[in-house]
Image (cartoon, rainbow, N blue to C red):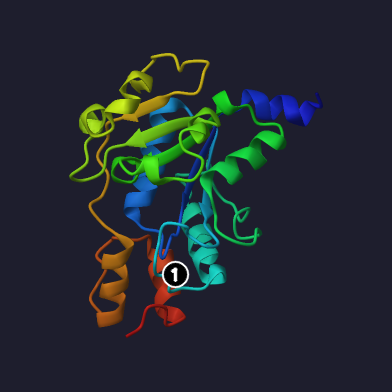
Amino acid sequence: MTSSQTGRAQARLGILGGTFDPIHRGHLDVARAAHDALALDQVWLIPSHVPPHRPVQPVASPFHRFAMVALAADAPDTPWLVACDMELAQEGPSYTAKTLERLAGSGYEPSRIFFLTGADAFAEIATWRDYPALLDLAQFVVISRPGFPVSAMRARVPELAVRMIDVFPEKPVPAQPSILLVDAPTADVSSTEVRRRLASGTPLEGRVPVAVERHAIRHGLYRA
């Protein structure tokens, strides 16, 4: 194993994928909650190329979605956030399993990859491609979202309850891929709401980083 591969095997890498149309405070709260709870070395924000679960494709172009993600990551208090275009560089739907397999192929061990998702999205995990095999490709980190506390996950997805572990400070992370539950407050905001506000000219009032708001307005994104 090369020195770079050794470093990858030892680092804790967080992965937060999404359409990011646009990225908002809720996404960033999920990233921060996982980073703080699990001492992640980095969290990669990965915009999807073709979201497989959305009947309507993104409004903003891949270029603008990645630009907004890069602006959101470029903050002095989040040096551990990284904008990553690995899914944008791939043709076809952006399946989580394929992304995790590519990371494993580049030297990352599944037990050191932390795939971040909100509790609302994880409730639909059975509909994801390659389920349940994809759960062995990474540590799945489920973070509370408004109306979807992680305390309810065992009841919502009972078939996976045996794999769920509540995360507490200083609690060791299991060596085998598991489902890690992180209870933390995250902003009650959605990309749909942000797009509607931008279309109507309604102030965003902190729902996205200032740099993201400026980019969207400057380029007329989501304008009615």
Quarter of the figure with residue 42: top right
The image shows residue 187, relative to residue 107, as above or below, that is below
For residue 31, above or below residue 4: below
Q: Position of residue 150 (x, y in %)?
A: 25, 32
Q: Position of residue 91 (x, y in %)?
A: 64, 62
User: Left or right of 11: which side holds 177?
Assistant: left
Q: In this rendering, is residue 218 above or below 96?
A: below
Q: Give the side of residue 122 with respect to residue 77, left or right.
A: left
Residue displayed at 34% across by 61% down: 208
Q: Is residue 90 above or below residue 134?
A: below
Count of labels shown?
A: 1
Q: Nearer the viewer, residue 164 or 133?
A: 133
Q: Residue at x 58, y 39 (%)?
A: 100
Residue at 41 percent of width and 33 percent of height? 141
Q: Is residue 166 left or right of residue 141?
A: left
Residue where numbered disc 1 is placed: 57
The spot of residue 45 in percent (x, y) is 51, 50
- From the viewer's side, name the closer residue of 123 and 213: 123
Q: Quadrant of the N terminus?
A: top right
Q: Secondary structure at mark 1?
A: loop
Q: Amino acid at mark 1?
A: Gln
Side of 155 relative to 90 (left or right): left
